[in-house]
Image: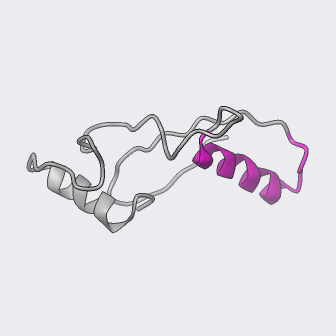
Amino acid sequence: SGAGVQGYNDLKNGINGEAPKKFPYPIFGNVIPQIDVFLDNGYTKEEEKMINETRKILGRPDLRITATTVRVPVFHGHSESI
């Protein structure tokens, strides 16, 4: 899980309506619109990471990218759309 074991447990326990411990809000059945804190450039740390990793993978350090990241709580999986 991108949110770690406690995030996974919050998701699992949220099925039964239990209050989350890692997040300040329920994550089961919700999409979280912000991952990590905002930086001075207006992107979140997760968005900045996605931009840098994409440039590195493609070998294009000057590639212009606009990123928006959201956390979709699921039990198994990870995806990226560019």
Q: Quick check: is 36 in the magenta stretch?
A: no
* Rendered residue at 30%/37% (across/down): 30
Residue at the bottom extreme, as displayed: 5
The rendered magenta stretch, by its main secondary structure, is classed as helix
| Residue 51 position (above or below residue 75) | above
Residue ID at (81%, 51%) = 55
Give the residue furthest to the front: 40
Residue 45 included in the magenta stretch of the image = yes
**Image check: 48 left or right of 28?**
right
Pinpoint residue 70: horizontal percent, then vertical percent. Answer: 48, 39
Task: Classify the position of the C terminus by image quarter.
Answer: top right
Quadrant for the N terminus in the image: bottom left
The image quarter containing residue 44 is: top right
**What is the x, y in percent for residue 77?**
44, 58
Q: Is residue 30 above or below residue 77?
A: above
Q: Residue at x 51, y 47 (%)?
A: 36
> Hey, which quadrant is residue 58 in on the image?
bottom right
On the image, the x and y values in percent for residue 74 come to 34, 52
Which percent across, then down, holds residue 19? Answer: 14, 48
**Image position of 9 (left or right of 59):** left
User: From which residue to which does the magenta span run?
Assistant: 44-63
Lateral position of residue 64 relative to residue 34, left or right: right
Q: How is the image coloured?
A: one colour
Q: How many numbered discs sit on the rendered protein? A: 0
Viewer-proximal residue among 31 and 80: 31
Residue in the picture at 49% in, 44% down: 35
Camera-side residue: 19 or 50? Answer: 19
